[in-house]
């Protein structure tokens, strides 16, 4: 896993592992050929990735796994298609049909149902542990001497969130957070690969200059981004309304 800031308003540029990551702001004029956003470009094995409820549903669909008690991902997705009338009822649904606004909302509903069921399971496990006499609520951390690298992953509402930290003799030397919107709205990588927003929604917009200025914003909103990736507004210069990096 790496982060690239070749097109972001930070010093440096080439891909770095989060443990070696740098986040030193260096704002410049908006230039779609150079730097044009505060969002870095994370990559997994050199490839962009989409995260969030829809990604969960797609992975579950591909693996034909159970999402909830007695319910498979295929069943959940088929229900979505039936409600939205996104498919011909005479043929089997396909995960490619999920790339729509309504399907993303359905994926969030599926995730809410999955988490509510999981919450009850975890509550029962906690209760059982307490009844067995395990009432420990705190483990004092002990940091070994030298340099320690650690990482924590969490499936946040918008997608995978990871925190990467380097600790030296008990003191934090480096910390990088790779948030969900960085994956979904990341910039062009040094190699030129695009992020999910540009691939799924941006591509047609870049080839057709006629959509209203609000169209790119509406497309991005489907991902519920936590960062305004583009066009950025807290920079020395702001691109024309509706402008997207090519």
Image (cartoon, helix red, strand yellow):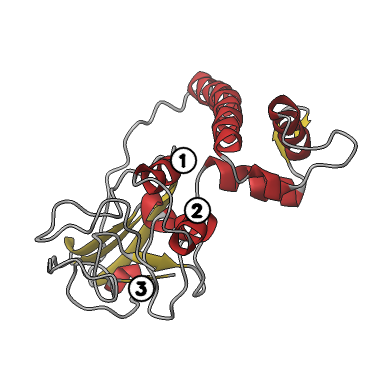
- Badge 2: residue crowd in 10 Å (few <14, some 14–19, many ≥20): some
- Badge 3: residue crowd in 10 Å (few <14, some 14–19, many ≥20): some
Give the residue number, with chain letter if any, for mark 1: 222
Residue drawn where x is 14% and y is 52% of the image? 234
Residue 178 in the image: state x and y as whole percent.
35, 57
In this view, the mark in front (3 or 2) = 2
- Estimate the spatial distance between the alpha carbons at disc 2 and disc 1, rounded to whole Å: 10 Å
Q: Of helix, strand and loop, which one carries label 1?
A: loop
Q: Are marks 2 and 1 in contact (CB under 8 Å)?
A: yes
On screen, residue 136 above or below 214: above
Give the residue number, with chain letter if any, for mark 3: 17
Residue drawn where x is 52% and y is 73% of the image? 45
Labels 3 and 2: the sequence-earlier one = 3
Seen as rendered, the residue at the extreme left is 236
- Estimate the spatial distance between the alpha carbons at disc 3 and disc 1, rounded to whole Å: 29 Å
Give the residue number, with chain letter if any, for mark 2: 201
Labels 2 and 1: the sequence-earlier one = 2
- Estimate the spatial distance between the alpha carbons at disc 3 and disc 2, rounded to whole Å: 28 Å
Q: Going by the image, does 18 lie left or right of 146?
A: right
Snapshot quadrant of residue 118: top right
């Amino acid at each position: 896993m790496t982060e690239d800031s070749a097109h972001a308003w930070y010093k440096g540029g080439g891909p770095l592992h989060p443990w070696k990551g740098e986040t030193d702001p260096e704002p410049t004029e908006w230039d779609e050929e150079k730097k044009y956003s505060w969002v870095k470009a994370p990559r997994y094995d050199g490839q962009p990735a989409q995260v969030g409820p829809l990604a969960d549903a797609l992975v579950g669909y591909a693996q034909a796994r159970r999402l909830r008690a007695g319910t498979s991902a295929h069943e959940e997705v088929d229900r979505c298609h039936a409600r939205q009338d996104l498919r011909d009822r005479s043929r089997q649904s396909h995960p490619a049909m999920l790339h729509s606004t309504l399907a993303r909302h359905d994926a969030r509903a599926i995730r809410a149902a999955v988490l509510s069921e999981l919450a009850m399971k975890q509550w029962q496990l906690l209760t059982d542990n307490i009844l067995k006499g395990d009432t420990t609520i705190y483990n004092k951390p002990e940091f070994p001497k030298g340099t320690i690298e650690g990482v924590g992953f969490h499936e946040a509402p918008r997608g995978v969130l990871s925190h990467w930290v380097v600790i030296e003799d008990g003191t934090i030397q480096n910390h990088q957070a790779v948030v969900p919107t960085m994956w979904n709205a990341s910039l062009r990588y040094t190699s030129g690969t695009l992020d999910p927003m540009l691939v799924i929604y941006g591509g047609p917009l870049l080839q057709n200059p006629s959509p209203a200025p609000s169209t790119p914003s509406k497309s991005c909103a489907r991902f519920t981004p936590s960062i305004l990736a583009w066009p950025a507004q807290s920079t020395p210069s702001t691109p024309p309304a509706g402008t997207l990096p090519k």
